[in-house]
Image (tube, rainbow, N blue to C red):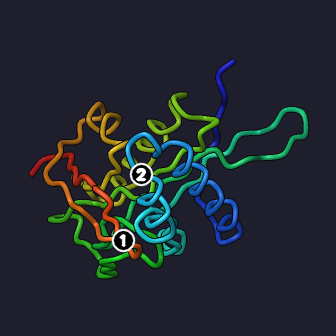
Amino acid sequence: MKATFQLRLATDDDVPALHALVEASVRGLQAEDYAPAQIEGALGTVLGLDTQLIRDRTYFIAEILDQNTKARHAAGCGGWSKRKTLFGADAGPGRESELLDPSVDAAKVRAIFVHPDFARQGLGSLILATVENAAYAAGFRRFEMGSTLTGVPLYRLKGYIETERIAVPLKNGEALPIVKMVKGAN
């Protein structure tokens, strides 16, 4: 039976669950594309939660209801930004809090993570569609992201085009390859 996910805007109360979800996602799904040292160096900086998105009300949490206990569990998350920062957590590099102009700038698709237990069930696509629709409703017609190597195949399927590869220096001396991708009219 396919899981049924419910998406809602994330709140400050969700932050602990989101941190745990992001870490589980990165450790469980990024290992094929990144070395352990890259993952360790990237968690909490390049790969992590940006709470500005929660404050801006542009970050979603996907939950699944446990039919036995009736408890809700975080299955995925993701958002978009009306700010210039392309990727990264609260402590990430290159933070730019200036607001974007939807008439000329691309909305930033940000921090989409899926728990490994729910990978390849359409949740990443559902989150991406929700994020794009919300940014579109806010007036944006173009989208831009800094994708992990793991996310590139999905984003290509959804119409994103690779424009640049960036090697982001990490605090432990490693570098994390990130792929800048865009979608929409230029």
The image position of residue 11, as x and y in percent, is 64, 67
| Pick the front one: 129 or 94 | 94
Label 1: which residue? 170
Residues at circles 2 and 1 in contact by the CB criterion of under 8 Å: no
Please report the residue visible at 54 percent of the width from the left and 55 percent of the height from the top: 60
Q: Is residue 137 above or below residue 51?
A: above
* Amino acid type indicated by mark 2: Ala
The residue under the point 29% across, 59% down is 139
Which of the image's four quarters has the N terminus? Answer: top right
Badge 1 element: loop
Mark nearer the viewer, 2 or 1 = 2
* Secondary structure category for the residue under label 2: loop
Residue shown at 32% from the left, 51% from the top: 147
Q: Percent position (x, y) of residue 65?
A: 77, 39
Asked where in the image residue 75 lies, by quadrant, the reply is top right
Q: Nearer the viewer, residue 22 or 57?
A: 22
Question: To which residue does mark 2 refer?
Answer: 35
Horizontal relation, residue 141 to residue 55: left or right: left
Against 73, is 67 above or below? above
Q: Earlier in the sequence, mark 2 or mark 1?
A: 2
Question: Residue, x 90% and y 33% (percent of image)?
Answer: 68
Could you say which is closer to the camera, residue 25 or residue 159? 25
